[in-house]
Amino acid sequence: MTIEPLRTAVVGCGGHGTALARAVVRSDQLQLVACADPDEVARRNVAVLADGVSSHKSVVELLGAPDVDAVLIATTHDALAPTALAAIRAGKHVMIEKPMALNEEEAKEVEFAAASADVTCMVGYSFRYGMARYVSQLLAQGAVGDPRVITGAIGTPAMDDGWVAQASSGGGPMLYVGCHLIDLALWIMGEEPSEVTARVHYAADTEVDETSAATLGFSDRRLAQLVVTQKASGFFYDFRIIGSSGFIGLRGRNFVQFEIEVQSDVLEAYREPTIIRPSMRGDNVTMMLVPELAEFASAIVDQRPAAITATDGRRVLRVIDAVGQSARSLRPVALAPTLTAY
């Protein structure tokens, strides 16, 4: 039986929205039919990627079109949750770019709305579909045994211009890239932390977070220590998992050039520390976003939860909220297990 491609719209036609649109065009499961952005040039750049793409100034205008099944949302952070709510209430499936919302309360509203409307809601943590999938494969083979400690750092150059430098828009590196580290830590540990301790330095000129250091305490005395900064000379990430039977390190300076270091007492091929440099054929659209959208489309067709649910997105924001709370109070913040919003 032939399944028709899902008619897909992109809201937010900046850099990442355009990349998502390119991924749609490369997909057999999705068809690009519409886009929306207040910037005429930005939406024109997306509209020309495929034939017959309708162009709209606002999400309200776009949602009035009957030929849209799913919406990919890549707006500024402050507009993510409101846009998602509008699309969900119009009966559309949604994939919301990370971090999904500004805080847990906004995320909870989206989670509840999606469950009530019985639509698929996925959060776009694309690291899982690029470099981190190699780490996941090694973990599935038992390379490190029981993960006990995670250390991670991620950084960008100064975020001193545009919406990423404005607290009201959800700017700053924690929501922009730090959320990826937290998502990976929760994913690998397989649970939420029970305690968060953090310190945050804020930029004097923009008042968004400049550098954050957080310790997440998990069950059975397991820990994750994470640093997020906008004081780096360039984009980078460095992530290490230490377990009872080995370790895995992931580091890189872009999305398609990275290396993995692994040592394992379990896997014979990695008895000695070994560096792996995966051969990446294609750009980040092909290597990360196309498989991410394939999961989104499959979840819709199969009528099952997506791999990264609204609940998963809310859990990350809950930790980010706790980072801010701990930094302000200079005390650890205890977290009870998350309950679903419905």
Image (cartoon, helix red, strand yellow):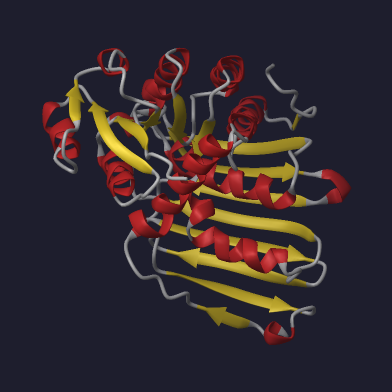
To which quarter of the image does residue 15 belong?
A: top left
* x, y percent for residue 194: 79, 36
- Asked if residue 234 can be seen in this view, the reply is no
State whether residue 235 is above or below residue 310. below
The one of 53 and 210 positioned closer to us in this rendering: 53
Would residue 69 be found to the left or right of residue 298 on screen? left
Residue at the extreme front of the image, as rendered: 1
Given the current orientation, which residue lies at the most extreme right position? 220
Q: Position of residue 92 (x, y in %)?
A: 44, 22
Task: Work out which quarter of the rendered image holds the C terminus and state it.
Answer: top right
- Vertical order, 242 against 114 (above or below): below
Q: Is residue 187 left or right of residue 285?
A: right
Residue at x 75% of width, y 42% of height: 191
Residue 262 visible at all = yes
Residue at x 70%, y 50% (from the top left corner):
224
The residue at 64%/57% (across/down) is: 151
The spot of residue 121 in percent (x, y) is: 53, 29
The vertical placement of 285 against 97, above or below, is below
Observer-nearest of 52 and 142: 52
Looking at the picture, how far across and down is residue 176, in whole percent?
A: 43, 39
At x 59%, y 55%, the residue is: 152
Residue 84 in which image quadrant: top left
- Along the viewing direction, whichever of 236 and 256 lies nearer the viewer: 256
The one of 101 and 36 positioned closer to us in this rendering: 36
